[in-house]
Amino acid sequence: MYIQNWDIHLKPEHRDEYIALLIEEVRFAREREPGIKRFDIMQNLAEPNLIHLVEVYTDKAAWEHHRNQPYLEAFAQKTQHCYATPNPMRFSEARNLEPLDHEWK
């Protein structure tokens, strides 16, 4: 498995716009890219302008395939004004302990 995590800090006035665009983008990607195992969007309850993303791919090749999709550049252009701070990604290669890798749907 290949995992990418983001903590995204949003400007309050653009939070709802960003969340709507992100949900649309994630649904689009999950429907078209079989290498995506999970793509979870979570809103921090204590800090509603903080969004957590957890992306899980079958392997690094699936992640690279996702990162090279042309629609990601369009998403970046539409949302760059929404960020309150830079939002670094964290990556790791891992194996799942529960459920096991082969049990993921």
Image (cartoon, grey):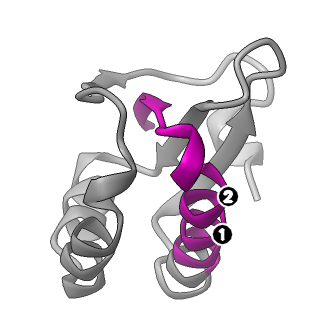
The answer to which of 40 and 33 lies nearer the viewer is 40
Side of 89 relative to 99 (left or right): left
Figure quadrant of the N terminus: top left
Element assignment for label 1: helix
**Residues at marks 1 and 2, CA–CA distance in whole angstroms:** 6 Å
Identify the residue at image location x=60%, y=52%: 39
The residue to which callout 1 is attached is 20
Q: Which of marks 1 and 2 is in front?
A: 2
The answer to which of 83 and 88 lies nearer the viewer is 83
Identify the residue at image location x=22%, y=63%: 67
In the displayed structure, would residue 49 be above or below residue 56? above
Please identify the quarter of the rendering in which residue 71 is found: bottom left
Looking at the image, do the residues carrying marks 1 and 2 touch, with CB atoms under 8 Å apart?
yes
Residue that extends furthest to the front in the rendered view of this protein: 13
Q: Where is residue 17 in the image (x, y as percent from the top left)?
A: 59, 66
Q: Where is residue 38 in the image (x, y as percent from the top left)?
A: 63, 51
The residue to which callout 2 is attached is 16
Q: Position of residue 58 (x, y in %)?
A: 45, 51
Q: What residue type is labelled 2?
A: Asp
Element assignment for label 2: helix
Q: What stretch is highlighted in magenta?
A: 1-27
Q: Where is residue 96 in the image (x, y as percent from the top left)?
A: 62, 24
- Is 13 one of the magenta-colored residues? yes
